[in-house]
Image: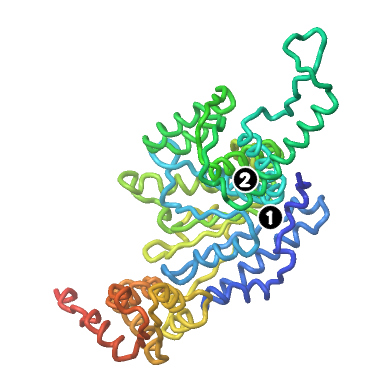
């Protein structure tokens, strides 16, 4: 296994704030203030790791609060940031949590989910490093199964004066011939397995199953997945595993044997320690919809009964506490929290003061305009235009967009957001689906054709949805 200190090395150390912003610009248009702040926060994490141990623990992360309407890039910034540095990242909605004593999710579950994510990351990395060894072990065991003998070498029956069942040949020549023939058989099988000739042949394989898997299904059916996961962990340690024989095809047997080889090669306790360390040092939790739990002095009944209680339950986690997980105790002191909310009805000042103080960096994201929508369609990697071109290309249809058509789509998007609910860039998905509905439906029959989307086509398809606003509802 790798040294835990080596696991902490990520691409963050090689990226300056300017480079981080440049990477985010490939996927997110505008919102330069937000990008700068998250880039600085990320670089500060790397700077902290370079400090001497006596001061490193004193440097706490500067949590960020993003304020802005839906669809302007709040979630996307945090998600791309975590992917950029390969850090443990989860997105949770604050509105799903409830105060202790009420039905709902426990606030500490966000930390447990983050450790689960970190564990999967370090496990995937360990499997990549052990892949060649696991593949070789699985192949040898598969050859043993195909030969139909035990895994150890079978010695021939040789002459022995006290054994009436022994043969009458000398041992030296028999053993050599057996070894040579068995080795030749293994090499022939190895070549046939590599060529895929035996993929559909069945072999009998011993697989282990745990009673904990049965219990997991019971808890999932009752909506208590988190309790089910904990019970599965407990039962897997207590209850003995049962082994049963299954007949499977060679291609499936190779996967099962490879998984069994991983189980033997990988030290799960070391993975758990690395997962906890990565969570504590690199973890990022994105708290969405935090405005939904804002509100002090709300009536003590109905849906508002536990809003302030949820804030007070979240507070110690953000401040820094110890959360017990199945991988061990996790300190949250250096986890970076990025909160986001529209704050249309509630205000930031409606949060309890202690929680406000734990998000010292605040940034307001701007509503997107027609120019932003046009850049989203043209300049981002794998934009909607590219996606629709590639999707229809699978049917043999070539899709092209005129420049004035793209500009008109952006203008309609801004107009619809202004006249109805402002859902930001998500409006583009609705518009593109309406615009290309007939082309997508007739795609299989139009193979080999080139279809050009013009401004007249955009106007014809979308103008009927731009009905004049009903002003009578404002007349008393």
| Total numbered badges shown on the rendered structure | 2
Picture quarter with the N terminus: top right
Between 214 and 228, the one lying in front of the other is: 214
- The answer to whether residue 348 of the structure is visible from this angle is yes
For this view, does 165 lie left or right of residue 398? right
- The answer to the question of whether label 1 and label 2 lie on touching residues, with beta carbons closer than 8 A, is no
Vertical side of 378 occupied by 163: above or below: above
Please tell me which residue is depicted at 50% across the width and 46% down the height of the picture: 312
- The answer to whether residue 263 of the structure is visible from this angle is no
Q: SS of the residue at dot 1?
A: loop
Residues under labels 1 and 2: Cα distance?
A: 23 Å
Between 85 and 183, the one lying in front of the other is: 183
Label annotation for residue 60: 1
Q: Which residue lies furthest to the right in this view?
A: 172
Label annotation for residue 119: 2
Between 420 and 23, the one lying in front of the other is: 23
Q: Position of residue 176 (x, y in %)?
A: 82, 32
Question: Which of the two discs, 1 and 2, labels the residue nearer the N terminus?
Answer: 1
Please tell me which residue is depicted at 72% across the width and 45% down the height of the picture: 133
């Amino acid at each position: 296994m790798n040294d835990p200190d080596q696991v902490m090395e990520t691409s963050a150390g090689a990226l300056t704030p300017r480079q981080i912003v440049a990477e985010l610009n490939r996927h997110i248009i505008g919102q330069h203030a937000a990008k700068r702040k998250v880039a600085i926060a990320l670089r500060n994490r790397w700077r902290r790791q370079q400090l001497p141990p006596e001061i490193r623990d004193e440097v706490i992360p500067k949590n960020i609060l993003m304020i802005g309407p839906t669809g302007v890039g709040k979630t996307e910034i945090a998600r791309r940031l975590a992917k950029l540095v390969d850090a443990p990242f989860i997105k949770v909605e604050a509105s799903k949590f409830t105060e202790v004593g009420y039905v709902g999710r426990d606030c500490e579950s966000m930390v447990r989910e983050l450790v689960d994510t970190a564990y999967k990351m370090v496990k995937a990395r360990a499997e990549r490093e052990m892949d060649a060894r696991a593949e070789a072990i699985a192949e040898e065991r598969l050859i043993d199964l195909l030969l139909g003998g035990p895994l150890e070498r079978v010695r021939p029956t040789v002459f022995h004066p006290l054994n009436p069942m022994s043969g009458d040949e000398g041992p030296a020549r028999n053993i050599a011939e057996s070894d040579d023939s068995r080795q030749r058989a293994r090499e022939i099988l190895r070549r046939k397995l590599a060529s895929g000739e035996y993929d559909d042949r069945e072999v009998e394989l011993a697989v282990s199953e745990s009673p904990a898997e049965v219990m997991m299904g019971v808890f999932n059916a009752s909506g208590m997945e988190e309790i089910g996961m904990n019970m599965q962990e407990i039962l897997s340690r207590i209850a003995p595993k049962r082994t049963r024989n299954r007949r499977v095809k060679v291609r499936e047997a190779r996967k099962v044997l490879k998984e069994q080889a991983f189980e033997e090669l990988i030290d799960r306790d070391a993975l758990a320690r690395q997962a906890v360390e990565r969570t504590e040092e690199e973890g990022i939790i994105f708290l969405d919809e935090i405005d939904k739990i804002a509100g002090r002095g709300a009536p003590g009944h109905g849906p508002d009964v536990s809003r302030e209680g949820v804030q007070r339950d979240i507070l110690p986690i953000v401040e820094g506490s110890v959360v017990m997980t199945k991988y061990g105790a996790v300190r949250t002191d250096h986890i970076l929290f990025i909160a986001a909310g529209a704050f249309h009805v509630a205000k930031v000042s409606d949060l309890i003061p202690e929680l406000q103080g734990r998000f010292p960096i605040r940034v307001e994201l701007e509503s997107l305009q027609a120019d932003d929508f046009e850049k989203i369609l043209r300049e981002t990697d794998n934009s909607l235009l590219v996606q629709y071109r590639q999707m229809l290309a699978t049917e043999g249809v070539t899709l092209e967009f005129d420049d004035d058509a793209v500009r008109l789509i952006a203008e309609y998007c801004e107009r619809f957001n202004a006249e109805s609910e402002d859902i930001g860039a998500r409006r583009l998905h609705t518009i593109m689906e309406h615009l290309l509905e007939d082309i997508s439906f007739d795609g299989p029959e139009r193979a080999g054709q080139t279809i050009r989307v013009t401004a007249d086509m955009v106007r014809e398809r979308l103008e009927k949805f731009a009905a004049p606003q009903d002003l009578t509802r404002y007349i008393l």
